[in-house]
Image: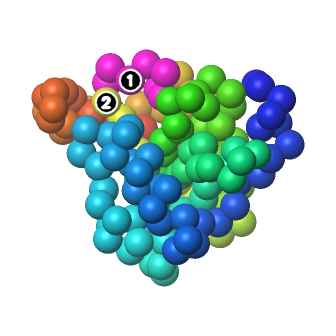
Amino acid sequence: MNSCFSHVRPRLADMKDLAGIAALEMAVFSHPWNEEMVSSSIQGTYDHVKILETSEGEIAGYIIYSAVCDSADLLRVAVDAGSRRRGIGFKLMEAMIDDCKDRNVQSIFLEVRESNAAAIAMYEQFGFIKISTRKKYYDSPVEDGLVMQKQL
């Protein structure tokens, strides 16, 4: 992991982070959330949005997850292309898992494109296992989605 992010901890996003998150969303996803959707998560009761910033204050990555009762769903995780392979996704995942443990969550679920080997490998490092496949879950391009789960 690049040392420039080794000491940095993700923080809870607030509305001043909205434009940066939305811009990264547009750059990373084939079906990006719009600002209203991101705003809803930032202000939501059950959704949690955490960001990791560069030393210049730019958003290097973010994670959005929903925790309700004893279950959580990873909704979005993204890292800026120029900041990849520096442990940012790993730190964001750690922050989510730690928060879910604090909230007494028992299981975390996620969906991932079956071709996204890098994400799948990271999720497996955290103990997520494949529990099912959703046929043609994604489009642009059409692809199956893997459903993965981690027991806490």
**Drawn side of residue 145 relative to residue 112, left or right:** left
Q: Residue at x 32, y 40 (%)?
A: 29
Placement of 57 over or under 115, stated as above or below: below
Q: Quadrant of the N terminus?
A: top right
Placement of 48 over or under 53, stated as above or below: below
- Give the residue pinned by disc 1: 116
| Residue 125 in which image quadrant | top right
Residue 118 counted in the magenta span: yes
Mark yes or no: residue 144 visible: yes
Mark 2 Cα-neighbour bin, 10 Å: few <14, some 14–19, many ≥20: many
Q: Residue at x 44, y 46 (%)?
A: 24
| Residue 122 in which image quadrant | top right
Placement of 89 over or under 21, stated as above or below: above
- Give the residue pinned by disc 2: 113
Q: Position of residue 135 (x, y in %)?
A: 16, 32
Q: Amino acid at mark 2?
A: Arg
Placement of 20 over or under 140, stated as above or below: below
